[in-house]
Every structure is written in structure tokens, then in C-alpha cells.
Image (spheres, rainbow, N blue to C red):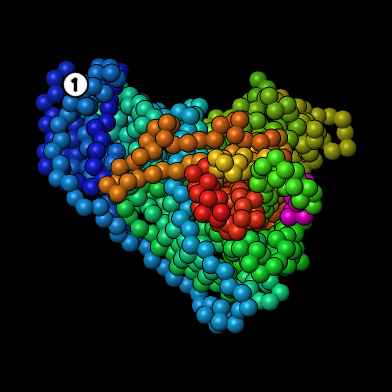
């Protein structure tokens, strides 16, 4: 095995004049011209199949080469690959590769611009109008494990071990870039050290390592360090919003208008955050009239794509801040104004202004429950006690709704083996979601066996050849449906074998408590006694589900330092039928931590020259355990009517409402000073300045 290191651009925008590749002590120095000569293609722009239940946003996107030959478009873009005997030699040599650049001015290009709706009349007749102009901070996922790729080429076939969260899609992408049939590519991922959306997309190093392995005739490993990942991992959020909410004298919503501009970075990876965000931007509220404009721009920064709850936290933040601003300015109670405008259970199924149909839910119930669990009614006593200690205390609430769609196809293959084991092949991949536990639990219930007897096989495109990956709250939602179907087919196959063994008609065989029994008799044969039986179930569906809930956050602010301490954070989430409540609680708590991180600490900062200023963990602030409270999470279970088992997605609930809840709590804490809004992240400096300016 040999090692590869990537030579990366130090410029945000520049033309490559020349690259000197005569570096001693290495096996090869490969450039973009070599890649072109060998027929490597650009990374395909593969948006997930258009879903009729999402707002369509179409655009024109330039190609994304795995190794640029002529021009660099962001700091950290790959311009050459060095292959050497050791990682240290490769990295040292990469620093000695001389690249001559002609720097260019930074540029911005609009590639999507879609407008819909007309609300002029509604706004003209409104008693109250509130506005918000905000920039949602760019963040990145920071998985514990940096990206690593190990590739080999043998007998005309590529095998790539990678930190990939979607082996089926990346097999197709690799084949497209390398110009070979998909059958000539195998992608393998074992334990994935974190994802959060940043490992769902294809990265140049996957193809570069495979290409280099073929060129040098040896396996090639390319392991990035943390700094490289900050430069070249997909970023996310980075949404500029101008929004307005119109209300009548009683606080009922009349109209909503929003203009959302998403920065895609230098190369278009995904417009999902923009489109999904717009589709649910009115959240769980009745809004008779809407107008929206969605724009996507290319800039000389790292590409952006989906990060936990892609696009929804941003728009929930906007609508919830507008509601709080309306309540403050016009004398409405913050809970009551929401109650007055929530979609009622009796209105389900409810078509929102963008045409999305919320299938079921009880939005008022989760708000009331969250407020009760968080002791909203007793807050003023806690505020007074904090003020006596010289602290400003605030409480904030945010409702939310999730649009769960994602890749529409999933397949399960179930094989029951005589040795007492059930093998499950599924196309999703866990990065901490507990698939091994929850899937085994679900399938064990189907067969009435111990979950320990179920073995999950995933993360290998030769084994799990079909699958849609893990994103958009789809793993259990899609997985349960196909697991149930595959189990039923395996049981049906077992009934036929049992009928022959027991000398009975197939129609007389029933499967109960793990045994095939002749109805009305005590004659039976066990599940594992009928030999190998199998079932495969493949399903494609575009039907969405809409997880929803409510978060309440309570903070204290030190007026001398501007430091915000999260005292309590409560979530009530409805994910439909809960298969494994413990895992759902864990997912919610992890999401709450991620949301608090963006609200208070995290931000990818570029200077005017396009240099990333937050490219290490010294500069990119993540929340520590001692900065987070003991979370309170509760589960509501209103079955989804669009899922055969009543499931909704359960992976995004903690993140989606957190920005709004934290921001509303901070604004509430500073409201006695007349402070209405603090931009995110609400760093100590920003909060401190808001306090000083108010005083």
C-alpha cells in the first residue's frame, strides 16, 4: 500500500499557469491534465429524483472536476495528487509541488432564481406587519473521523473503502467519473465516524485514490487531516433571508413573504436545503397567502449541501422570530398568538400554501405539552431570581414541522438460516443512529425471535446493491416498510416448506410465535427448522411524512461578558409510531446539541479574499458537554397516515426548532433592555455589544 496527499489551492479564485511535477522521492505527481488525458469525468450533479411533494427549483450548474486542470474556484480545491511510499513523504512532497497561479477577482453567479405567489393585497390590508432580515450562519458537520479513502485496482475492478454514507450512490458516481460500468466498482464502508449529512455526497478523493491505484498498480490510501476537512468538506446553511409577516388586529396571520438566497459555494452539490426550506417555511401555522423567491448563487467558497435537517432549521428560525417580534411589538402573548394560528387536528390532511399536504398531527397538543413540561407558567419567578443575581434570564419557544422525503427507493433482503440466524441486507447505513439495534428489534418482532439472532449486513455495494442511504429521516421510515415486506415473503416461503413437511395444504399453515402450525392442531415446525428461506422486497415511494414538535429553551446571560448559558432545553417530538423510544431520545438530544452549537458558537468565516478563517478547531467553536444542559425529551405518537406502519422520520427533530428556540430565549432575556434581535451565532461578543448598545 502507498499513500496519497492532495495539493490544494491557496487561492479562492485563480487560473493555473503551470505545475512542476518533478518532485524527488515520490512515486507520482498527478495533475488535472493527467486526469483529462486518462478520461476522468466531472463529478455528476445528481439531485435526488424530483419529488412531486417538494417545491421544484431548477437551475444551470457548471461541472465539478475531481482535479481541476485550469482554474481553481475555492481555497482547498484539489489541483494535484502526490503518491509516495508513506503518508509523511506524500504530505511533505505535496508542500514542495510548485504551482504558478494567476489570481482572479472573486465572483458570484446566480444559478437558480424562482418566484411564486402574490401577497400584495393581503399586506396592504394588514393591521400589523413585521419584518426580519437575517443571515443564517454557514456551518459544517465536523464528524469525529476525517475523510479517508483506501482504493485498489485488481483484475479490472476498483474496490474503494471510504468514509461514505451512501455506498450505492457513490458506486454510481465513481463509475461515472472513472468511465467504467458500475459492475466494475465496489464501495465499502464499515464503521462510519460521523456523518450529519457531510458524508452523503461524493468527494474528489474517492475517485482520485481509485485512479491513482490503477496508475501506480498498488493500493492507495488518502487520509485527510482536520484542516483539510474544514477546507473541503461540504459546508451548509449560509442562507440570506428577507421575510415579512402580515397580521390582522387579533394577531391572526394574513400573509407571509420571503426571499431566500442560498450560497451553494464554488460547485453545485445540492439545492435540497433551499427547496425543502421554502416548502415548509410557514411551518405548522395557517397562512392564507404566501409569496416566495428562492435564489441560489455560486461563490468562491467551499461547496454547501445538506446538513442535519437540511434547510428546515433556517426557515423555522425565520417564522418563529417573526412571530415573537409580532408578539413583542403589538402586545400579543407569545403562546396565545401561536395557538391562534396553529393548524388544527380537525383540518388534517392540510394543504399548506406551497401545496404540501400535512398528513396528520396535533400541533396544539405538542405546544401545550412542551410549555407544561418546561414550566413556562413558572418562568417569571425564575427570571426575577436570576435578575437578583445580576443575570438576564429568558425563555423561548419554537414549533416546527419536518418534510421527510429523500431517495424514494429502498430494498430489504431477509434470509432465515437453519443455524438460528436471520440475515438482513438493507441499503441504509448507520453513523450512530442505532440501526443494528432498531432494525434487529423490528425484524425480530416480525419473526418472533430474539433480536440477537438478527444480523444486519450493510455498507458494501456488492452486498447491498440497492438502497437510498441515510438522510431525510428515511432509514426506519423506508426500512421498516421493506423489512416488513421481505419478512412476509420469507414467511410465505416458509409456509410452503412447512406444508410439505407437515403434509398439509399451504392454506392451512399459519405462522404464530415463531412456528409454522397446521390450523386447529398441535402439529408444527419451527422457523429455523424449514431450511433456508428468503424474501426480497423492493419499494419506491415519493410519499412524504411530516414529523413535527415543539422546543422550549431557557437561557441566562451574564451582562458583563455576554456569555449565554443554556439552562434548560425541552423537546416534544412526534415521529409517528416510535419503534425504539430510547434511540429517538438519543437522536433528539444529539440534534439539540447540534442546534445549540449553531445558535451560539459555530460559524465558517471567510474573509474578503475568500480565505477560510475558521479552518481549525481553535477557530471553529463547537459546544462542549459542560456548555449543554440536561436535556428533556418527550415523544408524542400520532400515526402518520402516509406510512403503512404509521412512521415518520425521527432524526431531525432536535435540530430543526433549536435555532428559533434559542434565539427567542436570548431576545426574551434582553427584552427589558429593548433588544429585539441578536444575529446567529449569538456569540458573547454579539450579545455583549447588543447589551452595551441598548444601555
Q: Nearer the viewer, residue 531 or 313?
A: 313
- Among the 4 quarters of the image, the one containing residue 185: top left
Find residue 690 and report its horizontal and vertical position in percent: 53, 52
8, above or below 304, in the image: above
- Can residue 128 be seen here? The reply is yes
Which residue is at a point 30% across and 59% down the rendered structure image?
109
- Among the 4 quarters of the image, the one containing residue 60: bottom left
Give the residue at mark 1: 27
Find residue 610 and report its horizontal and vertical position in percent: 29, 46
- Among the 4 quarters of the image, the one containing residue 240: bottom left
Which secondary structure class fits the magenta region best? helix
Which residue is at a point 13% across and 20% down the rendered structure image?
24
Part of the protein shown in magenta: 366-373
Find residue 560 and report its horizontal and vertical position in percent: 57, 41
Magenta region includes residue 571: no
- The mark total stands at 1
Find residue 568 and report its horizontal and vertical position in percent: 69, 41
Amino acid at each position: 500500500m502507498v499513500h496519497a496527499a492532495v495539493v490544494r489551492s491557496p487561492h479562492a479564485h485563480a487560473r493555473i499557469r503551470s505545475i512542476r511535477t518533478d518532485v524527488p522521492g515520490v512515486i507520482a505527481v498527478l495533475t488535472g491534465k493527467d486526469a483529462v488525458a486518462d478520461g476522468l469525468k466531472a463529478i455528476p450533479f445528481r439531485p435526488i429524483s424530483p419529488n412531486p411533494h417538494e417545491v421544484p427549483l431548477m437551475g444551470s450548474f457548471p461541472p465539478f472536476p475531481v482535479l481541476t486542470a485550469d482554474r481553481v474556484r475555492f481555497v482547498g480545491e484539489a489541483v494535484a495528487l502526490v503518491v509516495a511510499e508513506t503518508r509523511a513523504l506524500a504530505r511533505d512532497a505535496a508542500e514542495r509541488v510548485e504551482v504558478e497561479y494567476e489570481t482572479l477577482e472573486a465572483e458570484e453567479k446566480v444559478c437558480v432564481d424562482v418566484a411564486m405567489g402574490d401577497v400584495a393585497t393581503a399586506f396592504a390590508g394588514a393591521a400589523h406587519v413585521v419584518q426580519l432580515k437575517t443571515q443564517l450562519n454557514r456551518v459544517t458537520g465536523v464528524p469525529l473521523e476525517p475523510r479517508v479513502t483506501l482504493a485498489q485496482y485488481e483484475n479490472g475492478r476498483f474496490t474503494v473503502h471510504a468514509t461514505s454514507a451512501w455506498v450505492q450512490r457513490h458506486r454510481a458516481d465513481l463509475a461515472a467519473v472513472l468511465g467504467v460500468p458500475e459492475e466494475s466498482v465496489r464501495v465499502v464502508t464499515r464503521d462510519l465516524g460521523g456523518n450529519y449529512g457531510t458524508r452523503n455526497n461524493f468527494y474528489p478523493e474517492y475517485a482520485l485514490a481509485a485512479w491513482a491505484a490503477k496508475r501506480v498498480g498498488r493500493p492507495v490510501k488518502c487520509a485527510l487531516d482536520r484542516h483539510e476537512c474544514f477546507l473541503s468538506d461540504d459546508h451548509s446553511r449560509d442562507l440570506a433571508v428577507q421575510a415579512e409577516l402580515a397580521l390582522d388586529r387579533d394577531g391572526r396571520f394574513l400573509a407571509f413573504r420571503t426571499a431566500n438566497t442560498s450560497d451553494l459555494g464554488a460547485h453545485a452539490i445540492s439545492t435540497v436545503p433551499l427547496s425543502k426550506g421554502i416548502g415548509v417555511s410557514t411551518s405548522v401555522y395557517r397562512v392564507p397567502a404566501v409569496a416566495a423567491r428562492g435564489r441560489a448563487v455560486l461563490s468562491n467558497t467551499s461547496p454547501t449541501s445538506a446538513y442535519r435537517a437540511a434547510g428546515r432549521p433556517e426557515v423555522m428560525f425565520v417564522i418563529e422570530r417573526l412571530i415573537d417580534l409580532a408578539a413583542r411589538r403589538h402586545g400579543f402573548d407569545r403562546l396565545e398568538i401561536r395557538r391562534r394560528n396553529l393548524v388544527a387536528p380537525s383540518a388534517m390532511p392540510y394543504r399548506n400554501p406551497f401545496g404540501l399536504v400535512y398528513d396528520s398531527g396535533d400541533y396544539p397538543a405538542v405546544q401545550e405539552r412542551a410549555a407544561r413540561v418546561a414550566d413556562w407558567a413558572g418562568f417569571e419567578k425564575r427570571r426575577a431570581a436570576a435578575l437578583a443575581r445580576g443575570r438576564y434570564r429568558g425563555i423561548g419557544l419554537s414549533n416546527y414541522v419536518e418534510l421527510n422525503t429523500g431517495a424514494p427507493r429502498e430494498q430489504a433482503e431477509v434470509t432465515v438460516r437453519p443455524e438460528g440466524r436471520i440475515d438482513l441486507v438493507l441499503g441504509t447505513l448507520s453513523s450512530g443512529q442505532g440501526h443494528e439495534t432498531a432494525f434487529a428489534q423490528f425484524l425480530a418482532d416480525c419473526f418472533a425471535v430474539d433480536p440477537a439472532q438478527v444480523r444486519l449486513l450493510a455498507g458494501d455495494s456488492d452486498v447491498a446493491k440497492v438502497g437510498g442511504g441515510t438522510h431525510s429521516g428515511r432509514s426506519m421510515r423506508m426500512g421498516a416498510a421493506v423489512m416488513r415486506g421481505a419478512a412476509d415473503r420469507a414467511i410465505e416461503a416458509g409456509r410452503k416448506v412447512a406444508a410439505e413437511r407437515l403434509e398439509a395444504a399451504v392454506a392451512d399453515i399459519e405462522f404464530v410465535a415463531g412456528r409454522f402450525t397446521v390450523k386447529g392442531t398441535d402439529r408444527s415446525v419451527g422457523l429455523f427448522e424449514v431450511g433456508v428461506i428468503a424474501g426480497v422486497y423492493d419499494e419506491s415511494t415519493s410519499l412524504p411524512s411530516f414529523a413535527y414538535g415543539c422546543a422550549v429553551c431557557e437561557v441566562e446571560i451574564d451582562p458583563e461578558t455576554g456569555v449565554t448559558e443554556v439552562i434548560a432545553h425541552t423537546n416534544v417530538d412526534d415521529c409517528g409510531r416510535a419503534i425504539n423510544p430510547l434511540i429517538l431520545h438519543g437522536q433528539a438530544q444529539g440534534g439539540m446539541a447540534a442546534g445549540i452549537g449553531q445558535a451560539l458558537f459555530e460559524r465558517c468565516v471567510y474573509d474578503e479574499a475568500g480565505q477560510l478563517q475558521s479552518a481549525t478547531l481553535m477557530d471553529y467553536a463547537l459546544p462542549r458537554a459542560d456548555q449543554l444542559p440536561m436535556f428533556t425529551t418527550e415523544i408524542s405518537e400520532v400515526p402518520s397516515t402516509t406510512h403503512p406502519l404509521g412512521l415518520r422520520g425521527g432524526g431531525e427533530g432536535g435540530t430543526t426548532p433549536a435555532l428559533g428556540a434559542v434565539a427567542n430565549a436570548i431576545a426574551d432575556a434582553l427584552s427589558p433592555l429593548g433588544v429585539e434581535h441578536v444575529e446567529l451565532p449569538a456569540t458573547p461578543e454579539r450579545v455583549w455589544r447588543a447589551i452595551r448598545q441598548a444601555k
